[in-house]
Amino acid sequence: MSSVDPVAQAERQTYPGLMPQEVAVLREWLRLHESEYDRFEYNCRVGVGNDPGPTYSATMREMALNLTKKRIDAIAYKSNQVTLIEVKKRATLAAVGQIVSYRTLWQADNPLMPAPILLLVASSFDADVMPVLSANAVSYAIVAFNATLIPFRQFPSK
């Protein structure tokens, strides 16, 4: 979870759960929009997960549940209004399915909160995605892909 000064969000070192190219897309979106929100959370688990059953130890069952819950890339908060954010380098119909599913799972986990806004952030979109976004009340943002924002991972030298 993160609720620090919003100016620092685009400069975070890590965004758990995101691939390097998705990090670049999210950083660019944050540079443009982070000041519009009060706080952010990343890699947020929703849903119930899959329980392997009583033949497994309580520890293993809990681990399995946590590992199989669905994960929302980011949640942006503005007062009590929540925006669920899915980030892709290239948005496809699969990404639309993800974000629409997250709405249902998030509402089940947070029944007293207002319905969330859905936002798909990407640097490009497949042609068939736009009408499906509209039909499912999903907002979108197209941001320039900046390869210099891809995190560089340094490995220790031997």
Image (cartoon, rainbow, N blue to C red):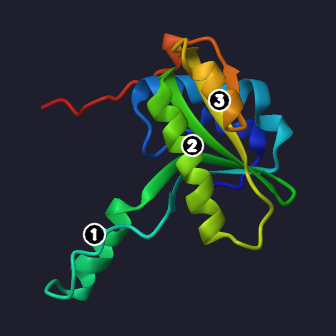
Q: Is residue 157 left or right of residue 98?
A: left
Residue depicted at 26% across the width and 87% down the height: 58
Q: Is residue 131 left or right of residue 145?
A: right
Rounded to the nearest angstrom, the CA distance separating label 3 from label 2 is: 10 Å
Disc 3 or 2, which lies upstream in sequence? 2
Disc 1 or 3, which lies upstream in sequence? 1
In the picture of the structure, the residue carrying the numbered disc 2 is 99
| Residue 51, above or below 58 | above
Q: Is residue 1 visible?
A: no
Rounded to the nearest angstrom, the CA distance separating label 2 from label 1 is: 23 Å
* Crowding near the residue tagged with mark 1, few <14, some 14–19, many ≥20 C-alpha atoms within 10 Å: some
In the picture of the structure, the residue carrying the numbered disc 1 is 64
Residue 14 screen position, x and y as percent: 49, 40
Residue depicted at 77% across the width and 47% down the height: 5
Determine the secondary structure under disc 1. Answer: helix
| Residue 93, above or below 100 | above
Q: Nearer the viewer, mark 1 or mark 3?
A: 3
Residue depicted at 56% across the width and 61% down the height: 105
**Residues tagged 2 and 1 counted as in contact (Cβ below 8 A):** no
66 vs 130, nearest the viewer: 130
Q: Nearer the viewer, mark 2 or mark 1?
A: 2
User: Which quarter of the rendering shows the C terminus?
Assistant: top left
Rounded to the nearest angstrom, the CA distance separating label 1 from label 3 is: 32 Å
Residue 74 screen position, x and y as percent: 60, 46
Disc 2 or 1, which lies upstream in sequence? 1
Question: At label 2, which amino acid type do we have?
Answer: Ile
Question: At label 1, which amino acid type do we have?
Answer: Ala
